[in-house]
Image: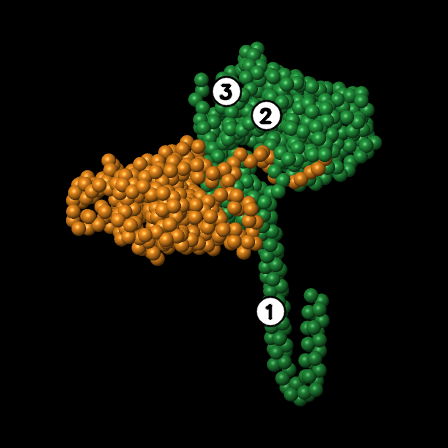
């Protein structure tokens, strides 16, 4: 007979951080594989490097902070952050770009605030935005999908590019602005949408390849909803935010504004709605708050895309909304049982 | 079919009910000694009415209180008072408390019952008899029934709700009680109706207890009551919580800071109904109750009708003993809201619905070690009070007590749903309990310091007044002296030595008067 004074409930845990994180990783697989299918294995190399560096940084910082290393490494939160970060990078990136970005993600984005659970800003977005501002050339060098360029890239090609040993001129022929970027610069030159979208990089609904990748993120995202890993409020509100803004302007002038469907399936809207904005640590926590938070990100994405300086705005929109979270949470508390 | 409502959140839990339902309800044998804590209810302490060496009969009142909110204690069997001493009791703190120890003589000789004439009884008299029988709410809270009934009656009751929900895992004592004593339950409901005169009565049972439900229906058919309905409600934890049950059945919420009868509702547990029936019909005080023994570390889980004061070790023996005695954890109540016991010497009391016997491994051990909160809000989704548990945790951990109160800490019913779903395995309820007791302690200290301050300020004022009065007196005296001096001016001038002597004398006199004050 022993007695240990622990407080109720005395039930075995039903859930764990590790399980949640693994679910997110599984949900990322369809999109990641579709991405690799259209654009070659570069993205997989980016993910591999990002995860490797992230785990190294995480271990080193935990050691410096005198925190237990093993339990934090195995919660896989660093893996998820690194994975999402890697998906933001151009599909072919030099290794040092990954290293610098992940460094910021883990140090400035996560541990300077106290580690998992204490960071006010989405760590992956912090790392990505630092790179976008610091290394604009590398961060805007995107490549055509294999189906358009006709080149099929092997893992060795990607590795050579990453290590900086590849023939740059040969690669230059394959590079191209993203569909979002083409729309933005085209409209800047007052070219009509229909004309811009006649370029071969555009597919049925949005950019060739990109539209399918977005749909694959959607599949993973819906699975997260079905398993109740995430709730519907943020993704639905975010997509609604984008749709509402895009529809409004599209209906007003179909030649100067891209269609709502194009906005939804281009760039990072879908992955942002289901995987990035839903990062629980940095998102709003109340139901009403999450709807406001989602709508805000959706609207900001559109504003930044159309009138801002960058072709896509998911990262900035998420970081701006992160800042408002304490405020949103405080003013959207639910009505407690028995309160008027 | 009655329209049912939903409460926010809640959990579907593994029931673990069948383990203790495979055996019929048994009568627990008498142990050699019974340990009856003086206080087995919410409220004031009782005082013993017996002395060491006295012989008592079954049903004798052996301890009672003077306050309105108390419940007397009766001898569960005949025997001799062996001691009135400190003994381990069922309390979350693990502390001991004063118990009346009875050496059981085994004859189980009862005091002569004097059942009242039921036809003649009015509500006041019934409540008085219930008070004398030491009846408390047997659902677990152990609030004395008679003051609750008086207040309920004074408020006027619209709907009487009988709680046979029993939503916590493992516990089956109410289920067993309804199956075996259905008629007594229904007659008890009848007495409650006579006392409270409600417009309607709802007897609620979770839909995982079809046998109990059928037994009650049969009993109700044999003893028809007006406007009384048996309502099956969905099995979801914590539907048996009073506030949640009210919400399910009526769609109403008990307003913040009020009680059920403020909105015309009155809830009573089925076990309490049986106790009331026995008190009124047989003049039998509350001396036994049905107790479930269950868990993953006991040979034969089951239900025993047990005399109060029986040591848990005795029941464990009746249930075939521990599977692994070296790894046994005892919990009184259910796994969601119960509390750890210091050992098996602890006696069964009025509130003991269940003794959970678990293995060490099944109970999470290191509450200090958990992952950080990732604000996933799974806790918010399941909270029946619609709180924001993760925000409460954040502020409780930062010891920001005011903030915790802004986030309605005291509306937490400690049901444990949040802790159960937390992916970081944070013992959230433990944080809230700690925060609540810190705040209560601070409030008490504040009250004390307020009193001390008022006392101090009063003293200061009193001293000030005294000083003022003295000053006034001195002033008057000086004036009188001066007048005197002005009168005998010539002589003073003639003899300055005499005048100086007079001044000294006056001063001395003033000093003496001052001392005498």
Task: Tell me which residue sits at (51%, 43%) in the image.
Answer: A75
Quarter of the picture holding the C terminus of chain A: top left
**Category of crowding for the residue at label 3, using alpha-carbon neighbours closer than 10 angstroms: few (below 14), some (14–19), many (at least 20):** many
Rendered hue of chain A is: orange
Residue A59 shows in the view: yes
Q: Is residue A163 left or right of residue B418?
A: left
User: Residue B238, image x and y in percent?
Assistant: 53, 30
Q: Is residue B397 left or right of residue A165?
A: right
Quarter of the picture holding the N terminus of chain A: top right
What letter labels the chain drawn in green? B
Q: Which chain letter goes with mark 3?
A: B
- Can you identify the residue that label 2 sits on? B16
Q: Depth-wise, is mark 3 or mark 1 nearer the camera? A: 3
**Category of crowding for the residue at label 1, using alpha-carbon neighbours closer than 10 angstroms: few (below 14), some (14–19), many (at least 20):** few
User: Residue at the bottom extreme?
Assistant: B494
- Can you identify the residue that label 1 sits on? B472
């Amino acid at each position: 007979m022993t007695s240990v004074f622990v407080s109720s409930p005395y039930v075995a845990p039903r859930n764990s951080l590790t399980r949640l994180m693994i679910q997110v990783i599984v949900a990322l697989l369809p999109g990641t594989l579709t991405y690799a299918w259209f654009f070659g294995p570069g993205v997989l190399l980016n993910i591999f490097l990002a995860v490797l560096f992230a785990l190294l940084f995480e271990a080193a910082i935990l050691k410096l902070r005198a925190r237990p290393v093993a339990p934090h490494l195995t919660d896989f939160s660093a893996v998820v952050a690194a994975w999402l970060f890697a998906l933001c990078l151009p599909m072919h990136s030099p290794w040092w770009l990954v290293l610098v970005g992940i460094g910021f993600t883990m140090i400035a984005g996560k541990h300077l605030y106290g580690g998992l659970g204490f960071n006010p800003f989405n760590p992956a977005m912090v790392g990505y935005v630092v790179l976008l501002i610091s290394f604009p050339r590398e961060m805007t060098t995107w490549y055509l999908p294999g189906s358009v360029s006709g080149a099929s890239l092997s893992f060795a090609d990607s590795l050579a590019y990453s290590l900086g040993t590849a023939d740059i001129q040969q690669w230059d022929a394959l590079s191209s602005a993203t569909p979002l970027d083409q729309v933005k610069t085209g409209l800047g030159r007052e070219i009509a949408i229909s004309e811009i979208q006649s370029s071969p990089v555009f597919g049925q609904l949005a950019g060739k390849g990109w539209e399918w990748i977005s749909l694959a993120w959607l599949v993973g995202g819906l699975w997260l909803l079905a398993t109740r890993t995430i709730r519907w409020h943020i993704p639905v509100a975010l997509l609604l935010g984008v749709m509402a803004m895009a529809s409004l302007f599209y209906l007003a002038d179909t030649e100067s504004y891209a269609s709502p469907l194009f906005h939804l399936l281009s760039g990072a809207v879908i992955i942002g709605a289901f995987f990035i904005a839903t990062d629980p640590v940095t998102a709003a926590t109340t139901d009403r708050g999450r709807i406001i938070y989602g709508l805000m990100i959706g609207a900001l994405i559109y504003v930044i895309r159309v009138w801002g300086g960058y072709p896509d705005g998911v990262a900035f929109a998420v970081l701006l909304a992160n800042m408002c979270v304490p405020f949103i949470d405080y003013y959207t508390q639910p009505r407690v049982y028995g309160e008027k | 079919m009655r329209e049912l409502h939903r409460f926010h959140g809640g959990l579907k839990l593994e029931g673990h009910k069948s383990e203790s339902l495979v055996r019929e309800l048994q009568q627990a044998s008498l142990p050699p000694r019974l340990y009856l804590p003086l206080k087995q209810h919410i409220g004031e302490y009782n005082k013993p009415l017996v002395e060491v060496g006295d012989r008592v009969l079954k049903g004798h009142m052996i301890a009672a209180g003077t306050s309105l909110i108390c419940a007397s204690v009766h001898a569960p069997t005949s025997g001799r008072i062996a001691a009135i001493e400190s003994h381990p009791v069922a309390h979350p703190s693990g502390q001991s408390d004063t118990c009346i120890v009875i050496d059981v003589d085994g004859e189980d000789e009862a005091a002569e019952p004097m059942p009242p004439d039921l036809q003649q009884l009015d509500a006041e008299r019934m409540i008085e008899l219930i008070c004398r029988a030491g009846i408390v709410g047997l659902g677990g809270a152990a609030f004395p029934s008679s003051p609750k009934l008086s207040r309920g009656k004074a408020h006027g009751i619209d709907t009487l709700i009988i709680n046979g929900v029993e939503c916590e895992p493992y516990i089956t004592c109410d289920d067993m009680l309804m199956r075996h004593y259905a008629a007594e339950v229904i007659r008890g409901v009848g007495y409650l109706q006579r006392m409270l005169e409600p417009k309607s009565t709802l007897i609620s049972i979770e839909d995982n207890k079809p046998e109990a439900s059928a037994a009650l229906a049969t009993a109700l058919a044999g003893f028809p009551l007006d406007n009384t309905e048996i309502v099956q409600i969905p099995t979801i934890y914590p539907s048996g919580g009073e506030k949640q049950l009210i919400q399910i059945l009526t769609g109403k919420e008990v307003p913040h800071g009020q009680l059920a009868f403020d909105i015309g509702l009155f809830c009573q547990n089925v076990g309490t109904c049986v106790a009331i029936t026995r008190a009124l019909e047989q003049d039998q005080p509350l001396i036994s109750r049905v107790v479930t023994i269950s868990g993953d570390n006991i040979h034969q889980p089951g239900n025993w009708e047990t005399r109060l004061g029986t040591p848990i070790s005795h029941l464990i023996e009746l249930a075939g003993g521990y599977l692994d005695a070296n790894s046994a954890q005892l919990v009184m109540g259910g796994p969601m809201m119960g509390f750890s016991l210091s050992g098996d010497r602890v006696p069964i009391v009025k509130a003991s619905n269940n003794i959970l016997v678990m293995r060490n491994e099944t109970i999470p051990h290191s509450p200090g070690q958990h992952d950080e909160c990732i604000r996933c809000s799974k806790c918010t989704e399941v909270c029946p009070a619609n709180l924001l548990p993760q925000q409460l945790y954040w502020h409780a951990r930062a010891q920001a007590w005011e903030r915790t109160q802004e986030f309605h800490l005291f509306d937490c019913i400690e049901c444990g749903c949040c802790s159960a779903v937390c992916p970081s395995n944070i013992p959230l309820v433990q944080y809230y309990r700690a925060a609540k007791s810190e705040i209560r302690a601070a409030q008490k200290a504040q009250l004390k310091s307020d009193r001390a301050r008022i006392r101090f300020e009063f003293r200061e004022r009193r001293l000030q007044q005294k000083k003022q009065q003295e000053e006034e007196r001195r002033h008057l005296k000086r004036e009188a002296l001066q007048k005197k001096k002005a009168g005998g001016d010539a002589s003073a001038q003639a003899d300055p030595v005499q005048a100086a002597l007079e001044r000294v004398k006056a001063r001395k006199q003033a000093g003496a008067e001052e001392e005498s004050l």
